Image (spheres, rainbow, N blue to C red):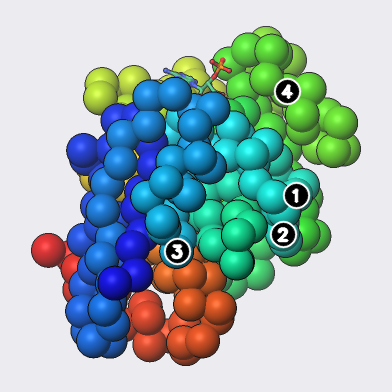
Amino acid sequence: MLLFSIFGYPVAHSISPRLHNTVLQALKLDGCYIRKAITDPEKLVSTFHAMKLEGANVTVPHKETAFAQCDEVRGIAKEIGAVNTLVREGTRVIGYNTDAEGFYEAIKPFGYIRNALILGAGGTAKAIAIILKAHEIETTILNRSASRLAFFEAKGFTCKTWQTFTSLPYDLIINTTSAGLKDEEYPCEPELLKNIFAHSKYVFDVIYNKPTPFLELAKNYGLTCKDGKEMLLYQGVFAFNLFFSQHYDVKMIESLMRPAFDI
Ligand code: NDP
């Protein structure tokens, strides 16, 4: 039997096993996808080998540690500095980042985007900023504090803190902070958000399991809004395909995985 896992801490909430097992079963593959809580991040890859896994996904807070432990990192993950997908190739472990591609797939229906503003400067912001840059979308980073901006400055992004920011018209606004996940907080001052939304078209929140105050406010401005559900779906679709050497058609995997997501 082919074995796959999600690695993270905590992982009990993860729906990745449901997404991947649904596709494995639909394709009648002899495989199983399980959860594994990893408390010591230094043991990510040794655990991968010990469990005899074919592939794994990595979630918070281990994506950057996983990057450092892979035998090889491929694609856009090299620039992001974080991996969310591990694939066994013989005795080697190859790392990929499908969060970035998953995000880009999710915003494709928006159509042409000239520029974007990312709220937050954590790991998710890195993946999104790098994929937007790869698609030549001019991107500004706005974060609460300056401490995490060095990565983005080194890659040539315009970076601002709440103190130094002056709003310009942006086609797309993306919330990558966890503000609004467990509370009724906004990712920045609501008055500033109103000013930003007044000159925007599209709004994306990476949070997917609840309507955040950020998205609710954007809806009041009549903007086209999307939460993080499809980003999560597509990162899973692309990861599944990497587990099987890109053997399957992406649209077919999506059609099999999407109903599991909607349960
Ligand atoms: P990180 O911890 O790496 O980064 C958090 C960022 O948010 C920091 O820039 C921090 O600012 C900022 N922040 C946190 N709380 C607040 C607040 N109350 N107000 C303003 N800014 C705040 O987080 P991740 O990037 O790993 O994850 C962020 C979110 O993305 C999570 O909610 C996660 O669930 C979601 N996610 C969704 C995915 C999907 O597929 N839909 C995929 C991956 C993640 P500062 O630097 O000042 O502390």
Marks 1 and 3, how far apart in space?
Answer: 21 Å
Mark 4 or mark 1, whichever is nearer to me:
1
First of labels 2, 3 by sequence position: 3
Tell me which label, 4 or 3, sits earlier in the chain.
3
Quick one: 203 or 44, which is closer to the camera? Answer: 44
Task: Decide which of tag 2 and tag 4 comes sooner along the chain.
Answer: 2
Say whether disc 4 or disc 1 marks the residue closer to the N-terminus.
Answer: 1
Residues 156 and 96: in front is 96
Cα distance in 3D space between marks 4 and 3: 36 Å
Mark 1 and mark 2: Cα distance apart in space: 6 Å
Q: Is residue 71 above or below residue 118?
A: below
- Amino acid identity at mark 4: Leu
Numbered disc 1: secondary structure = helix
Q: Which residue is mark 1?
A: 78
Left or right: residue 107 versus residue 152 is left
Where does label 4 land, which residue?
149
Q: Which mark is residue 54?
A: 3
Which residue is disc 2 drawn over?
74
